[in-house]
Structure formats: C-alpha cells, structure tokens
Amino acid sequence: MGKIKSLDDLKKISKDYKKGLDLREKSSHPEELVQVKVAMATCGIASGAKEIMEYLDSELEKRAIDAVVTQTGCMGYCYAEPTIEVTLPGQEAVVYGNVTTEKADEIIEKYIKTGEFVDGIIPRNYETI
Amino acid sequence: MSSIKIKLKKQDIDKIKEITASFNNEEHELINVLHKCQQHFGYLPAEVQEVISDEMDIPTAKIYGIVTFYSFFTMTPKGKNPISICMGTACYVRGGEKVLDEFKKELGIEAGQTTKDGKFSISSLRCVGACGLAPVVLIGEKTYGRVAPDDVKEILAEYK
Amino acid sequence: MDTIKLTIDNKQLEVEKGTSIYNAAKSIGIDIPVLCYMSMKDLCIENKPAGCRICVVEVEGRRNLAPSCSTDCQDNMVVRTHTPRVLNARKTVLEFILSDHPKDCLVCPKSGHCELQDMAVKMGIRKIPGEEIAEMSTYRLDTSPSIIRDLDKCIMCRRCETMCNEVQTVGALSAVNRGFYAAVAPAFEQNLEHSPCTYCGQCVAVCPTGALTEVDHTPEVMTHLADPKKTVVVQTAPAVRAALGEEFGLEPGTLVTGKMVTALRQLGFDYVFDTDFAADLTIMEEGTELLNRLSAHLKGDKEIRLPILTSCCPGWVNFFETYFPDLKNVPSTSKSPQQMFGAIAKSYFAEKKEIRREDMVVVSIMPCLAKKYECQRDEFSVDGNPDVDLSISTRELAAFIKQANIDFDSLPEGEFDNPLGESTGAGVIFGATGGVIEAAARTAYEMHTGKNLEKVDFEQLRGMDGVREATVDFDGLPINIGIAHGLGNARKLLDDVRSGKSKYHAIEIMACPGGCIGGGGQPQHHGQTEILKARAAAIYTEDKNKKIRKSHENPFIKELYSTYLGEPNSELAHKLLHTKYFDKKKKIIVNQ
Amino acid sequence: MSGYSMHLLVCGGTGCRASHSEEIEFKLRNELEKRNLEDTVKVLSTGCFGFCEKGPIVKVMPDNTFYTGVTPGDAEDIIAEHVVLGRTVSRLIYEDPSSKEKVPDSKKMGFSKKQLRIALRNCGFINPENINEYIAREGYMALGNVITDISPEDATRLVKDSGLRGRGGAGFSTGLKWELTAATPSDEKYVVCNADEGDPGAFMDRSILEGDPHNVLEAMAICGYCIGADKGLIYIRAEYPLAIERLKTAIKQAREYGLLGKNIMGSDFSFDIELKYGAGAFVCGEETALIHSMEGLRGEPSLKPPFPSVKGYNGKPTNVNNVETLANVPIIFLKGADWFSSIGTEKSKGTKVFALAGKINNVGLIEVPMGTTLREVIFEIGGGIKDGKKFKAVQTGGPSGGCLTENHLDTPIDFDNLIEAGSMMGSGGMIVMDEDDCMVSVAKFYLDFTVEESCGKCAPCRIGNKRLYELLDHICSGKGKVEVLDRLRLMSEVIKDTSLCGLGQTSPNPVLSTLDNFYDEYHAHVSDKKCPAGQCKDLMEYFIIEENCVGCTACARVCPVNAITGERKKPHEINQDICIKCGACMEKCKFDAIIIQ
C-alpha cells in the first residue's frame, strides 16, 4: 500500500473500492460473484462463527461457486449468532441466523445455488445511513 | 528492615529485563509491563514483581498495590483449564450464579482458587459481551453458551 | 494578587485565589472537622486524597456536597458548613468509618490521642446502626522492632502512604487491594521487617488512629527497675525535653528538662544522664573526622571522599544502607549519640563505678522509633549484651510518668547526674534540623583555626526549608555545608553525591521533617507545623541558656578524653565510638 | 435455479408467534396445496422483524410486499389475491401513521423501522480488517475535509452545534469538552478514547471497535486536530482481545496509508495513536481514574476540578471521550451538524446504542434515535419478554442506573428523561426483567458489583456500599425489620451526596430506584417475610399439598433435619421452624405433592 498524500488520493481509493475494486481482484466476473459476510465479533466467534466461516470458505470453493467470504463486525442479532449475510448477484442481501454447518450446507445448496429461501432468515430490522 | 533476597532462574530474570527494557523502563508503562509479564509467566509471583521493581526503579509495595488493585492480575497460577463464569447482569438474571455454584460444588473450590491437581481454576468475570448466550462460561479459549447447572458435569468431563 | 469574595455561614470574606474552602473557613474561625486531610506547608507535606468525606460542606448550586479540604473557593460562592444535610452526612459517613473500626478504645494505645475517637466524641456518636451485621475488614497484626501495624484500625486516610512515599521516598508502604479490603501495607502484605522500611516512624507520627503505633518497651524498663541487682541508667535525647510537656497539657515549646529529670529519678532510674553529653562526644569524633578528611582532601588525596555525611540519625543510616549502599563509605563512621552513650556507659562509667556490664541496664528516652531498631543492631552489643538495652519514645515516657501517678507539672526542677549528664549548647541543638552541623562547625572551626569563635550562632544553618545550604568561613577556608531533613530531601542531595556533582564538604541529614523534634516518637503534632517550630525554638533557647555552648569545652568530655579515650579518633575511640555500615539493598540472586 | 418463484416469509418472532403466526403459516401452506402451488411458492418462518406491534407479519418476496396484522383468516386472501392474481391485499398493507398512506413496498418503509444505525453504521457491513472497505464508506473523508478546509475552531463549533453528548455516562456536551481542552494552552495535549467498557451487560463499545475500528481512529484524529493534540491513546480493557487485535490492525493500516502519523494527507497535521490496557477495574471508566491507570498507577479517581481538560494524562490537557461518542463524530462532519441535530429529542441528539439483554427474546445490539420509548425498544425491537412472562422492570445505566417500571415504558429515552425517572443512560446496558426477578435481589446484585469494584479511596463508597449490600442481604434473608428501609434510603442518599467520584455518587441508584418503584416488594420482604418473586431462598417455604401426598414417606426419609412428619399412607407435614429449605424433599417427591412458595 502506498501512502495517501492528499485528500484527492483518498477520494480516488474510495471511488475505486466503491466500484468493487476488491471484487474485481478476486473474480473475473464480479457481477456474478456471491458475497457472504460472517459476523465475527466476540459473540459471533463465541457461538462458532469461525468454524462457519471456514466451512463456507472451503465448501464454496469445493462446490465451484464463484463466491467471496469475508468477515464483518456485529450485526446486532446476538440472539441468533452465528449470523451470516448472503448477497446473491443483483439481489438484496439476506441474513441467516443460528447458522450451523448443516444450515450452511442447506444455504449453499438451496439459497446460493437456486435462490430458494431457507428457514432461519433474520429480517433486517434497522435503517442505516 | 532487612535486606531481601529474591531467587529466580536466569532466563526468567532476563525475560523480565527484556520486557521492562522494551518499555524503556518508563514508570507510566508499568501496567503494560505487568500485562506482558503475566502473559509470559501466567501469573505475577512476588519474585517477578521484585525484579520489575528493581529494573524500573519503582518500590515493590507500589507494584504490589497495583497488582492487587486490578482484578486482571493474579499472584496465583491459574489451573490448566481456567474456568471463567460470566457474572454480568445478563448472565446473572439468566442464572449465572447457579452455574458458578455448580462449578464450585463439582470441583470443591471457591472462585479464585485452583484445584489441587492444578487442572482447574474458577474465576468469575464481568461480562464478556456475549449476552445473547447468557449464561456464559469460558474454559480456556472455549466459550460455552446458555449453560444450565445440569450441563456442568458434562462440560467438566470434556477436560478430565 | 487575585482575590475571591465568598460567603461562608453568612459571613462574607475575601481570600486569595486558590484558597480551599477549609482554609477560608479557618481564617474566620470556623474549624471544619477533617480526618484524612493534613497540610504542613512549610515542610512541603500535603495529604489531600479527599477520601474521608468528613469535611464536606454545602455549596449553593452544587448537586452534591463538596469536600472543603480540596475544593477551591470560587467567586460569589455561598458555603454552609453546618446545615442539617451536612451534619447528617458527616455523621453517617463517620458511622460508616466506625462500623469498620474496632471498638477497643479502652485498651488502644492511641486512646486519648486518637483523631477518630475525638471525632466520634465531637459528633456525639452513641451507637453505630447496623453494627450487628457489619463485616469488619481484618488484617494480620505486624510487629517489627520499632513499629506495630494494626490495620484493623486503618481508616485509609493515606497520610502514612504520603509520608512514606512522597515525603520520605522510602516506598515501604502503598495502598493495596481494592474497595472494602483496601489498606496501606508493605509489598505482599509482609511484615515491615521484610520491607525497605527505615523505621523513621513518620507514618506513626501522622497516623490519626491506632493503626500505626510504636512498640511499647516500658514494661521491660519496669522489669529492670524492679530488679535490685540492676543499675539502670537513663539517657534523654535533646528533642525530648522540648516536647514532653505537651503530653501533660503544657504549651508546645515548653522546656521541661528539669521536671523530666526529676520524673525519671522518681521512676527509679539509678542515674539520670543526658544524651546531649554523647552529642558533644559525637562532635568531637565527627568533627575530627571531618577535619582529617578535609585536610587530606585539600592535600590532594584522591582516595578521600567528600562530603562527609552525619550519621547520628538511625533512620537515615537505614535509608542509605538500603538505597545508597554504594555510598556506605561516605558517611562519618561515628556512632550516633545514643550508641556512643551506651558504649561509654558500659565501659568508662561502668568501670568507674565498678558495675559489671551484665548488671547495668542502659535505657534511652528518644523522640525516635528508629532508635529502637538501632539499639538492637548486632554490631552495637558485646557478647550479646547491647550497649543500649532499651529505647523508649517521648510518648512512652509520658505514659510511664502518668502510670506512676506523678504530677508532672508540679515537679521540682532536677539536675542531671555526672559525669554523663553534663552537656553544652552544642549538644542540645542536635534536636533540630541543622543543629548537628552547627555544633560541628563551632568545634571544627576552633580546632581548625585555633581561634576562638566569637559568634556561636550560625543562623544561616537554621530554618525549616527541606534543603538548605550555607558556606561557613573557616578563617579563609570556605566550607560548603548542605542540610536536608526528610529522607526525600536527603535523596536529592545523595543523588548528587552519587553522581559526583555534590559541591558540599559536609552534609547533615535528619530523616524526620524538622529533625528529631519532629521524630516518630514525639507527641503527635496532628499536622500542625507550628508545634514543630515551637519545639525548635525551645531547643535553641536551651542552647542560648547554656553556659558552655561548644562541645569541646565540656569539662566532662575533656576528662573522658584525658583519662580514658586519649584523643578523638584514637584507637579506643574507634573501638567504642565508631561503626561501619552494611549493604542492605535488595538482592536478586540467580537460581541455577 | 430453484423451482420456487415466490416466497412467503412469515414472522416467527415470539410476538408474532403469540398472535398465531404458526397457524398462519399452516393456513398459507394449506391454501397453496389446495391450488397445487406448493412447489412454486415456499412458505418460511423467519426471525423477528422488530415490528411486533403490527404483527403478525407476512412478507412476500420478490415483490417486497409487507403485510401487517395478518390473521389466520387472511391466509386465503393472500394466496388467492396476491399469489394467484398478483393483486396486493390492500387492507393488510402497512399504513404510515403520520401520512396515513399505504406503503406496500417494504423497501420504501424504512423510515418506519425503529432502529437507525449511525454509530454502528459500518458494523456488520464492512470487513473491519480492511481499511479500503472503510474508505469506500467515505472513511477518513471527514478527517481529510477537516484538516484541509476547516479551522480547528470551526470544526469544534460544528461538533458543539450538532448537540452530540458523551455516550459514556453523564452526557456532557462533546463539543464543549473539546473547546475546553482546546482553550487550555499547553505544549502537549492528548486525545484519549475510553474503551474501558465495564458495565456488566454492556458491549456496544466492544462491538464498535470490533466492527468499525477505523471510525474511532478517524474521530480521534479529528479531535486531535480540533484541540491541538498530536497524540491519541486508547484505553481498552484487556478482556477484549479481539477488539485489541482489530485496533492494532487498523492502526497499522492507517499508518501505512499515512492516515495516522506525520503530515496526514500532506497537511501540517500529525497524529498518532497508541493503545493502553486496562486490567479489570470498573472504576477506570471514570476519566480521572482512567488517566491514573494510564500513568501506571492504581486506578483511583481524583477530585475534579482540575478536570482532565486542564490537567490530565502526564499533567497535560487531555480530552477523554468514549468509543460510541467518537463513533458519531466522522459522520457528523460528512452529513453536517444540522442533520445530526435533526435526529433525537430537544436536548439529546442523535441515536443511542443499547445492549439489550436479560429476559427478552431478541437479545442484541440495537441503535435507536433518542426519544424512542422503552416500550418500542423492549416490545418491538426486543420482541417482548421471554417465555411469555410478564414484564416487570428494565434496568438501564448499569450499576449507576436504576430499574424502571411499566409506568416508564412510554417515556422517550434520552439523557434527561432517564435521570428524571431515577435511572440514567450510562453506557447503554439495558437489562429486561420479568415477574420472576426479585427487585431487592437485583439491587443486591448491583451493590455486590459496586462493593467489588469500589476503589476504596473514599469512605462512603468503600464502607457505605458494603453496608448497603449487607442490609440488602439482611432483607433478602428475611431478617430485616421495617425500619431498615428508612436506613437503606438514608445511607443511599448520604453515599450519593458525599462520594468522591461518579461510581459512588451513583452506586445507590439501583437501591433508590427499586425502593421508589417497588417499595411494596421491599415491604413484603421485611414485614411479611415473603419474596413475591419467589427468588429469595430464605423467604421460601416448602409445603405439602395434602391431596397429592400419598404418604410414601420418601420425603421424610430424605429430609436431613427431620422436619417432615406424618404417618405412613397419610399426608405428611413440614415443620417450618425446622426446615432448612434444602429442597431435597421436593426433588424426591414423585407425586408433585411438595411445592415452594
């Protein structure tokens, strides 16, 4: 990483990443990429989020799905940890709670592969700015 | 008054010196130094505090005053499997105290003590922030959520 | 100067900016009660944790009560010091403190001198609500050669901690633990004996309760007095006579030398002698040592270390043995007056009177608690028989006199016995900071120049500043003198000595602020500097009243040298009157 | 691709479930089956929508149609009209309460959501270990703007104008605090971030640091620019290893980008941040204690004044803000003071993050605009009380706060209202209690905490709180007399009035607020020797229900103190004077004949 030497430098980076620069780095077809975020704050990790993230990472690769799995902070649904957010290309993000490896498998097979919702959806209950 | 003699292994003395030197022996870094030393030794025995005192030129009494002020610092070695029971409010209202009592009963020790075989020690801590899982128990790095007193035997069995 | 106008209890007043409500109230005669607060400005001693919350007052417009000791006056402030809210709060807080305090006042060594007891009386406490279910914080009793710590009685005023750390820089005590079980204690809550404590006793001097007291040696003294086979000899230190009267209700600064002598005689001591005699002897030895070192130094002897440091103060000796052992060859090797006295009493005097060493008991009355430890040092005994058997403090003597039902105030003036009771004004001023070096200067000047010293008062060496310096003209030879009282001040001078930056030829050090008059064994001053000043003034008055004011002119000292010791620093003098120091620094040993 | 062309999401939150959402689900499936649509339309149950007052809720995807107040009887219409004919069932559509307009598309009804995430805006959205994701969310843009275009005075004024108040405790104006620190001349100043979150049951600061560390770093740099400091310190609990790791990573990345360090973004402004660790002392949340702790001392508070803004870390002017406060700062610069002050109530602007926990269904981290009512938080966002129990109290403000009751449920939450109600905002722990919680025990729990965490410096806190605890324990064990209640209040008031720092000045709040709001419960403990919630063991009595007892003698045999007597095959009796309430009899009884009350 180079130094940001001016406000303009910063704005450029911001613009690049808003356009999904990092996604382009990870995939040749960023528009077809499935994005999975795993809530990895303390409570998530305490409930097994790490294992879920590892599972998703390896399974998605094994099953040849063009996906990027990243960690993120607390989504706020402590009662339903571990929680993950899945964004299918062109669709609204969906949050699943109480994710076990079985549930993760079901999410991959049904939701990610076919778009079929499965049980365990946590409706987003907040507005963000 | 009498002159005090402290015995420690050379590598231990060197380690403490290395730690204090890494903070330039600056007095306001004392708490960071104690953290590092506890990380290394697992606890802060009197000997370690004496060497820190010597290196940083801070009276031992003052260091001891600090070690006993902060509940994170301990002068007794923890068990191989340190058990921490969350006593935050969320865990309390969901029965954390009963879980603590059950651990005490099962192991025959009080909070702050270590079993004779050195396998377990119990401590209560304030809110690990996993209130969604209340009551929460930590054993080493592993977290157990929604623990009921009935689960205690089973949990302990994993470590026996 | 900025001033502030405010109202306290409906009285308007104007104070300097930065004045606390407590001091402002005091200036108009309102004495707000305090427990933890202690301020001795002239000595740079301040303890202001704002912890006891007894001194709270109501300030208009403020949500909660304000601790008057540490709240500064503000313009137009309206303060009320005794509203029902204030009184209720003070009383309740005092009840809290008392609920965690033993109620054994009847047998407490501090009874009658206890600030907490006084406060309970003042507040009219008759019972402590909830006492029956109140847990007490309890601690292990710690007895050392000089000091007893009974932390059950600690009220966390933190005065001792301030003295030990900020004033004395000894660092033996610190606040430990947290919350209800917090207390002030040595590292690992070990005994003081296993700490770097110097037994200076300043913690005891300021403790408002019975948490810190001296070890009481009067029972042993009584046992010896009751033993007809024993000849019991007593010596009294200079500072005692300037303070003992306070214990009997006399004004601070009242000299009670004669009454004290009579009292001691009535108590049954066989010989009542004066440590001042030994102080004169100290000057002979130390003065000679100074001149010898000085002349060697002037001749270019690089082996000689200057400055010479006085060594009469046992707290100070303990301090440098622990913190400056590398400098242990710098102080004078002369023993302290207490120990010189013991050595002479059990040799010269015992031989003279044909008393066997084991049949003689030497008791010292000292303003000091470190003296108790000093007389127990191995090097100050012969075949297990100590030169000084017991040392009791001014306070213990007062208690002893009261026990014996002696009406102190009406006692006739007595005279010390001879030969060890005769002293000069130089010996007397040992009791105040700067006195030892002034006494030494009087003698060293005449020894060095061979001239008669016209003006014996070295005013420039006196005072209460923590570190003082003066240059004394030894007939063309300027002698740079440094003075420090309080170990924190001593440390400053010692650091310079260690780094070779010290410009002094001689330094006097006293462990206690004010010197021996402010010693840990003196009647409690409760933080009032005026008391120390009055005692110092008394000491200088006694000096002025003495016919002889130079140690070397003391006829009995002369006789001692001519008939027994030979000359100062002679072989016998070395054997009896000099000592050596030990390295007592903490050792870290590699465990293989 | 999936065979399903449509999904019907039925809220399975506890609130909706209580209003027969399961039956709705069942009916919907039934209706689909009737029309052979079960393979094209899938019915699912979801977590709580946080909209319980309008429940049960059915959401149709992909249309995003949001049906509220659905009854089992509506299932047929939803299937027949919406699914089959593609016509929305207008009577079930959400109506905006202010405009009275129907809002069918749930995407457009965001304003009706109870939660607004400002401080948490990046939490759960970006990867906290990737600075680029933060920058993509306008990260460090506020800092860039401030240091290139705005004077420190103007920037400080903006914070002041926004109305932002400290989120850690008393709610002091953040802008004013900055102004005071800026006004103290000194060659050296410090910005301190207070991340010593110690309230039991509060974890919002930890979540922010774990989820959005750069936000806090940026805010600290802005503060440094405003007050004239080039050094920042984060005092963080050692018990938060993950937050520490993420902060370290963030600081490293920011330094690599030159967003921390010398001459940030080519300007004259330099600023760097260091971590300092706490070591388990709640009192260190108090700013003077925190500063002493950072100096390597015992974390004992000292009297204010002097305030840290005049004499703080190393004796230099120091500005201390807590994590959540700082997390609001960058966005205020991006969106403006007016925008921020448009959210919230008259005197409390913006939002507040709460850690919602206790006997509540949706335990979680929530962020709501100031002025939201407790009812909305507990019964909407929180999904109501667990296991269908009755709401009894909500504790806010941790050990410094108080317990609020049903009467306070419609109080809009802000700094001043909570204080008026006898509690306080504190750091934002919100613990919900139900009918099984004994309020005397709850007060005792908090006092136990305070006693353990009191530093011991001042007498009222050190000893007074201990005495309060003992008295509460006395009451809980049934030994207290009615008079002790007055004593309890008197002691509480004196402790508040005389303690040195905020810890002691607020520690009796849990006692006072429960005394005020649940006096009857205290009274029952001391006069009737009864614990209405059935929590105080010593006040419980075991009884044998005559009708159920068959006289098997099992209980009598197991009783360790022979308190149970009775003839064989006849109902037994427990002698209450002897009974030690061990519960062995109840455990042994196979006929449910022994009860506790």
Image (cartoon, grey):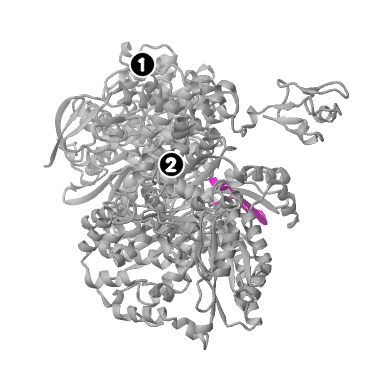
Residue denoted by label 1:
C262
The C terminus of chain D, quarter of image = top right
Between C98 and A22, the one lying in front of the other is: A22
Tell me which corner region of the image, top left, top right, bottom left or bottom right, holds residue D213. Answer: bottom left
Residue C415 vertical placement versus C136 (above, below): above
Q: Residue at the far bottom: name it.
A: A28
Residue D297 lies in the magenta-colored region: no
Tell me which corner region of the image, top left, top right, bottom left or bottom right, holds residue C412. Answer: top left
Give the distance between the C-alpha atoms of the residues marked 2 and 1, in whole angstroms.
64 Å
Between D448 and B21, the one lying in front of the other is: D448
Q: Residue at the far left: name it.
A: C1
- Label 1 residue SS: helix
Residue denoted by label 2:
D400
Callouts 2 and 1 on one subunit: no
Q: Which mark is residue B38?
A: none
User: Could you say where residue B15 lies in the image, as x and y percent from the top left?
Assistant: 54, 64
User: Could you say where residue D561 lies in the image, as x and y percent from the top left?
Assistant: 77, 25
Three-letter amino acid code of the residue under disc 1:
Thr
**Is disc 1 surrounded by few (<14), some (14 to 19) or many (20+) residues within 10 Å?**
some
Read off the chain for label 2: D
Mark in front: 2 vs 1: 2
At x 29%, y 72%, the residue is D144
Three-letter amino acid code of the residue under disc 2:
Ser
Q: Please say whether residue D298 is visible from this viewpoint.
A: no
Tell me which corner region of the image, top left, top right, bottom left or bottom right, holds residue A20. Answer: bottom left
Between D297 and D333, the one lying in front of the other is: D333
Query: What is the span of residues highlighted in magenta in the rendered image?
Result: B73-90
User: Could you say where residue D527 lies in the image, as x and y percent from the top left?
Assistant: 56, 21
- Label 2 residue SS: helix
The N terminus of chain D, quarter of image = bottom right
